[in-house]
Image (cartoon, rainbow, N blue to C red):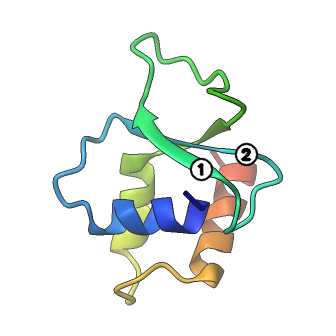
Amino acid sequence: MKLIEVLNQIRMGDSMDDRMTVYAKREWTPNSDAILTLQPKDGSTAAIDGHDYFLEAFIIKDWVDELDSPEITTEHCSRIIQYAINDA
């Protein structure tokens, strides 16, 4: 699945477990291959199947709750990527 698709899945997932975490292949772009999985119990952020830790679902939910758009656009995705790179 593409990163932007995973982010939109989180956007639509009202009952999604906040322990879910996004991992994506680098270099991060909206079209990067990404997976959504439970965060390891030990809190590790080690790569999973060649996908690097990106962000936890609850952080992404906070971001997307502020958007005035029903869907995450490429521009929104790029802003979230910048956050993951610079601030997470």
85 horizontally vs 4: left or right: right
Q: How many marks?
A: 2
Q: Nearer the viewer, residue 3 or 1?
A: 1
Q: Nearer the viewer, residue 65 or 77?
A: 77
The amino acid marked with disc number 2 is Lys
Figure quadrant of residue 38 = top left
Give the answer, above or below, for where 63 lies relative to 44: below
Element type where label 2 sits in the image: loop
Figure quadrant of residue 11 = bottom left
Q: Quadrant of the N terminus?
A: bottom right
The amino acid marked with disc number 1 is Ala
User: Are circles 2 and 1 on residues that touch, CB within 8 Å?
Assistant: yes
Residue 69: image location, x then y, percent: 39, 89
Q: Residues within 10 Å of mark 1 (few under 14, many from 20)?
A: many
22 horizontally vs 61: left or right: right
The CA distance from mark 2 to mark 1 is 6 Å
List the residue tagged with mark 1: 34
Q: Residues within 10 Å of mark 2 (few under 14, many from 20)?
A: many
Element type where label 1 sits in the image: strand
Q: Which mark is residue 72?
A: none
Residue 19: image location, x then y, percent: 33, 34
Residue 39: image location, x then y, percent: 43, 27
Q: Nearer the viewer, residue 1 or 45?
A: 1
In this view, which residue lies farthest toward the top?
42
- Which of the marked residues, 2 or 1, is nearer the chain's N terminus? 2
Q: Residue at x 67, y 26 (%)?
A: 47
List the residue tagged with mark 2: 25
Q: Quadrant of the C terminus?
A: top right
Give the answer, above or below, for where 48 lies relative to 33: above
Residue 4: image location, x then y, percent: 56, 68
Q: Residue at x 48, y 18 (%)?
A: 43
Figure quadrant of residue 12 = bottom left
